[in-house]
Image: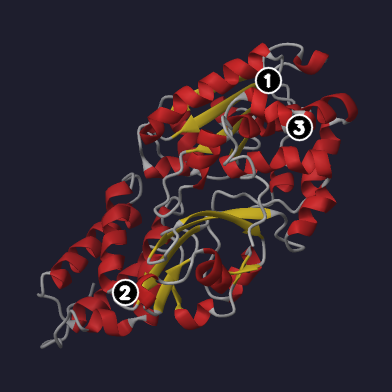
């Protein structure tokens, strides 16, 4: 039941070469944009498509591009966020490994639409093997006249640079990424101003995810209305979901927006391994609220559908847990991650995640009481909405949802409190 659009060449021999890409109609979108469309028309087509950012936030891509001031005298930059660091997500890696020219074409179309001459691909440091693949693809594109000066025989010119990060989760946040790209520590910036107005080097900048840019050539070739028709009215196109955990066939699956989550797990992924029952699902990477098996029943894989089900689509990392899972322990693992990855810039996140981790460690040692669970419940609202960037929210959403939906998994690890806890 997959709808292979971005992933359709994955099984083609030598899929990463430009020869394979051109033979399958590659760079037709770039040629169409450069020779038959004005930059504003490209942006309008992306708006029609209802393409939303595939990195996690889900902000409408065309609207984001439209925020860039076209009359600004400053240089404009296009930045690809390839820092894929969300636990449970591994789709961008495969897109870059198996079809890098699709990404390059999307980046060049975006650069033309935004009047940019410089593109940066900011890639996570652990993806070291992909850097050579991307640079080889850029060299091939240059040889064929798609990168550099006079692209496709027009006056458009653009350069692409691959820049590896140092493996910091915080650099998945766009302003922390920009600071890192400039050579500074990966600390998030205060917004506003937003990157569209003052981003890289204080210039207008658009930052989008790998999967987002990969969708752009298909939108330009086939039209925004066609792309929107693949999904729902507000969540257009297809989406790649990285399914892991207790399923028979884990992997990346590309389906239309609005696809039933239950169908993805039971049919596409072959159901729960060992014939066990489903207990819980984290549908959008580790930072979104956990879902119960009952909530999965009617949930659809689109932004509105996930919100209705009480969670978020996020980056599309679907983590499936069977009936043997101890949700307390999985949540403990997540808070350890978020504490480790906090950049330390702001007090609520730095101190709050540290307190939470200490409490989880205490409970895991068998020394916790119900008073410690109460303290965790009081700590979480003092972090959510109060941190400098969304990492604080991401750290507490899994905790608050897990404690609410699976209280028995937490209570079995603690003893009754023998005294009234002191104020936190």
Quick one: label 1 or label 3, which is nearer the N terminus?
3
424 sits to left or right of 241: left
| Residue under the image location 25 percent in, 69 percent down | 329
Q: What is the C-alpha distance between the residues marked 1 and 2?
A: 49 Å
In this rendering, the count of numbered labels is 3
Which disc number belongs to residue 159?
none
Quick one: label 1 or label 2, which is nearer the N terminus?
1
- 321 to 206, vertically: above or below: below
| Residue under the image location 48 percent in, 67 percent down | 270
365 sits to left or right of 46: left
In this orientation, which residue lies closer to the viewer: 175 or 256? Answer: 256
List the residue tagged with mark 2.
378
Q: Secondary structure at mark 3?
A: loop
Dot 1: few (<14), some (14–19), or many (≥20) neighbours within 10 Å? some
Q: Quadrant of residue 210?
A: top right
Q: Position of residue 327 (x, y in %)?
A: 31, 73
Q: Position of residue 250 (x, y in %)?
A: 44, 58
289 sits to left or right of 349: right
Q: What is the C-alpha distance between the residues marked 2 and 3?
A: 56 Å
The residue mark sitting in front, 1 or 3, is: 3
Q: Is residue 209 at least partly visible in the picture?
A: no
List the residue tagged with mark 3.
25
Q: Secondary structure at mark 2?
A: helix
Q: Dividing the image into 4 quarters, which one contains the N terminus?
A: bottom right
List the residue tagged with mark 1.
117
């Amino acid at each position: 039941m997959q709808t292979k659009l971005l992933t359709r060449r994955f099984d083609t021999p030598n899929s990463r070469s430009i020869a394979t890409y051109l033979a399958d109609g590659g760079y037709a979108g770039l040629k169409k944009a450069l020779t038959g469309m004005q930059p504003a028309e490209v942006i309008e087509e992306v708006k029609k498509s209802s393409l939303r950012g595939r990195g996690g936030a889900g902000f409408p891509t065309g609207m984001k591009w439209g925020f860039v001031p076209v009359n600004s005298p400053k240089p404009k930059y296009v930045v690809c966020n390839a820092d894929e660091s969300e636990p449970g997500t591994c789709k961008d890696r495969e897109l870059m490994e198996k079809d890098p020219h699709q990404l390059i074409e999307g980046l060049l179309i975006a650069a033309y639409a935004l009047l940019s001459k410089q593109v940066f691909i900011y890639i996570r440091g652990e993806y070291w093997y992909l850097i050579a693949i991307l640079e080889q693809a850029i060299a091939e594109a240059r040889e064929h006249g798609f990168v550099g000066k006079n692209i496709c025989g027009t006056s458009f010119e653009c350069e692409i640079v691959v820049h590896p990060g140092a493996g910091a989760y915080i650099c998945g946040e766009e302003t922390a990424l920009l600071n890192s790209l400039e050579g500074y520590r990966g600390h998030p910036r205060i917004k506003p101003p937003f990157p569209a107005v003052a981003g890289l080097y204080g210039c207008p900048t658009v930052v989008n995810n790998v999967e987002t840019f990969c969708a752009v050539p298909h939108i330009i070739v086939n039209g925004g209305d066609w792309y929107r028709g693949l999904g729902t009215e507000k969540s257009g196109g297809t989406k790649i979901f990285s399914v892991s955990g207790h399923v028979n066939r884990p992997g990346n699956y590309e389906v239309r927006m609005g696809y039933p989550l239950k169908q993805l797990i039971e049919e596409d992924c072959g159901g729960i391994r060992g014939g066990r029952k489903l207990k819980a699902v984290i549908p959008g990477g580790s930072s979104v609220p956990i879902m119960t098996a009952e909530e999965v029943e009617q949930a659809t894989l689109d932004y509105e559908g996930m919100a209705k089900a009480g969670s978020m689509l996020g980056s599309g990392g679907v983590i499936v847990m069977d009936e043997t899972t101890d949700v307390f322990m999985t949540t403990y693992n997540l808070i350890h991650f978020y504490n480790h990855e906090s950049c330390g810039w702001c007090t609520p996140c730095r101190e709050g995640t540290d307190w939470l981790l200490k409490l989880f460690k205490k409970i895991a040692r068998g020394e916790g009481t119900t008073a410690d669970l109460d303290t965790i419940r009081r700590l979480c609202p003092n972090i959510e909405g109060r941190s400098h960037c969304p990492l604080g929210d991401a750290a507490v959403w899994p905790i608050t949802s897990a404690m609410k939906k699976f209280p028995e998994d937490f209570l079995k690890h603690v003893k009754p409190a023998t005294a009234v806890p002191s104020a936190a």
